Image (spheres, helix red, strand yellow):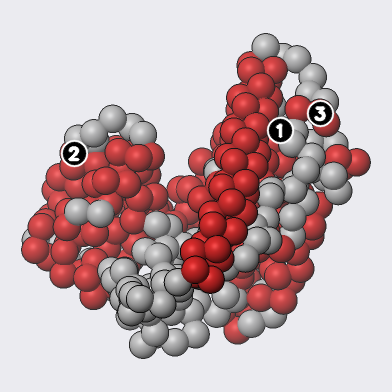
Amino acid sequence: MPQYRRALEEYNRAWQSYAAAAGAYWNLVSERRQLRNGKRAHGEPLSISDYVLAQPPVYTGPPKPINPLEPEAPLPHPVYVPVVVDFLAAARREFKFTPRLPQSESEFKRAYAKVALAAGLTKDQIVRIYGFEASGNGSYDVEAGLEYNKHGRAITTALGYNQLLATNSVEILAEKGSEFIKALEVKVAAMPGTPQPALDGKIEVLRRMVAFARSVPDAWNQHEILANTPKGLGVHALNLDLDIGPMLQTQKLADSIVFARRKGFSRTLSAAELEMLNLTGDGNGFDMVTMPASWRDQVPTANFFRASGYADNPVAKRNNVVAKLIAATDARMEEEIKKPGARELAALLQ
């Protein structure tokens, strides 16, 4: 016990020192981000000193010792992450809705390609982001963690070609749901004289889902709360529907392009640049892709994350400056687009 107490005291000192340094670091990251946002709002130029140029502190102290008088606690069971069968069950139970699933992967890809091109995405953006997000061969119902083994364990609710989280689905529906309803109404109107009870019913379901998504303020944390409810999981099942899924999967990327244009970014974003907006959020991604190239080798990727998000992102930690992260993303895309799924999507975009 004396040896344990000494080791515990040593660990506590080291951890407290690290925690203080890490807290100060991430507070500074937040302050510098607010400073940059303020400068942009007033049309003031940025300087490289507006970023934190040091890398985040890393704990290098001793491990926490085990109390010899207390049995070692068993490892907790991983938190269950809902999967496709749960989304479908929730949609049936909460909204009496069953998505129209495609007869083949090619059918969904064809619908997605049509919607994505119409939304203004380039062939290069569509194929390379599909490759990066869906592993180059992912199906329309691929979920994070199950890309290579459908019997494995999902790690998040990220779903489909562009890996939308359940929170993304709720948020997009809250903000763009009226446009989706209008698109379906146009589809019905294009079939005069032919009753379309399935589409009419889907429009009614979509109205109820949109109302649910808009039942809270338009804020990510509020949408996240909704996404984790049974109704929120039911909304996420829309990604699997042949009529609505392609619109949902496209919308997040289209919104990022509109965001960049609204900020004065006139040239076409490369696929890797667009993925930066997709990965870190529009504001942070825009910050990365608009900084001078000479800064990119010096600015740590930590500037564009919160502490928890950075800790959970091994790619951003490994490629720890902006230039490395963009280059690594582009290289990964280059490999993934060689796979059959990406090649099929590219052919449909001709």
Name the one closer to the observer, 252 or 289: 289
Mark 3 lies on residue: 49
Give the image location of residue 151, x and y in percent.
Answer: 36, 87
**Element at badge 3?**
helix
Query: Which of the two discs, 3 and 1, sits closer to the camera?
Result: 3
* Residue 175, percent from left and from top: 35, 36
Left or right side of 200 for 316: right
Residue 90: image quadrant is bottom left
Tag 2 residue: 211
Report whether 171 appears left or right of 226.
right
Separation of residues labelled 3 and 1 (CA atoms): 23 Å
Query: Where 163 falls versus 168 (above or below)?
Result: below
Label 2 packing within 10 angstroms: few (<14), some (14-19), many (20+): some
Give the residue pinned by disc 1: 265
The image shows a total of numbered marks equal to: 3
User: Relative to the observer, which residue lies in front, 23 or 304?
Assistant: 23
**Residue 321, image x, y percentages:** 77, 51
Residue 155 rendering spot, x and y as whole percentages: 41, 70
Amino acid type assigned to the residue bearing label 2 in the image: Ala
Quick one: label 3 or label 2, which is nearer the N terminus? 3
Residue 106 visible in the current orientation: no
Q: Amino acid at mark 3?
A: Ser
Q: Earlier in the sequence, mark 3 or mark 1?
A: 3
Residue density around tag 3, few if under 14, some if 14–19, many if 20 or more, within 10 Å: few
Is 204 drawn above or below residue 286 in the view shown?
Answer: below
**SS label for mark 1:** loop
